Amino acid sequence: MKLKVLGWILTVTIGIAILDYFNLLGTKKTIQVQAHFMQYTCGKNNIDMRVVAVSDSNSKYLIGETIAPELLNFKQAELARMVYSKTEAFQTGKQPALADFTLVGYVRKSTREHCSGAICFKVEKIKYAGDSTFTEF
């Protein structure tokens, strides 16, 4: 009997963790942030950005914080390629280029990732400062 109860508790805990990871519990509040891409030495797929402005006054705590834009695992490399290709001139110093992006998405609560300890930001769409339209994911 104790083993069954322990099994049920474990199953419910794992279920809640999965639902929370994919942000299926509660409501996710979509916000728009303007952020500056920062290149770290901890990996080619690291696309951490420093937030400079937010669309919602309740999210002002993000200003000055580092966010880690993320997609589903199989699309994360696609997002990283896009960010690096848009900022390539900036990184190589060949010409002045913007490293600023506008992202629409939501903060994944209570989660920090990557080598920098950045706040996870689930991206729904992104726009490079030099572009006129968003790329949707």
Image (tube, helix red, strand yellow):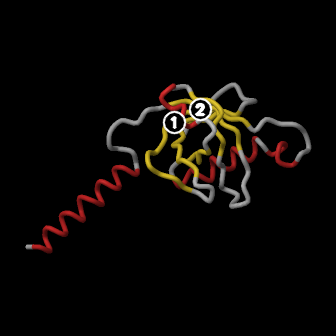
Residue depicted at 20% across the width and 63% down the height: 9
- Image-based side of 32 in relation to 58, left or right: right
Which quadrant: the C terminus?
top right
Which three-letter amino acid code belongs to the residue tagged 1? Answer: Gly
Q: Establish if 105 lies above or below 74.
A: above
User: Residue at point 48% right, 29% down?
Assistant: 58
Tell me the SS state at disc 2.
strand
* Residue 102 locus on image (x, y percent): 64, 32
Residues at discs 1 and 2 in contact (Cβ within 8 Å): yes
Task: Please rate how many residues cluster around mark 1, counting C-alpha atoms within 10 Å: few if below 14, some from 14 to 19, many from 20.
Answer: some
In this figure, what is the number of numbered marks? 2
Judge whether 103 appears above or below 69 on screen: above
Left or right? Give the position of 34 relative to 56.
Answer: right
Which residue is under mark 2? 33
Q: Quadrant of residue 43?
A: bottom right
Foreground pick, 70 / 9: 9
The residue carrying mark 1 is 105
Q: Which mark is residue 51?
A: none
Q: Position of residue 125 (x, y in %)?
A: 57, 35
Q: Nearer the viewer, mark 1 or mark 2?
A: 2
Measured Cα–Cα span from mark 1 to mark 2? 8 Å
Q: Give the mark nearest the N terminus, 1 or 2.
A: 2
Residue 113 place in picture, x, y as percent: 54, 55
Q: Position of residue 8 (x, y in %)?
A: 18, 64
Amino acid type of the residue tagged 2 in the rendering: Val
Left or right, 50 with reference to 5: right
Compared across the picture, whether 104 is left or right of 110 comes to right
Query: Picture quarter containing residue 25?
Result: top left
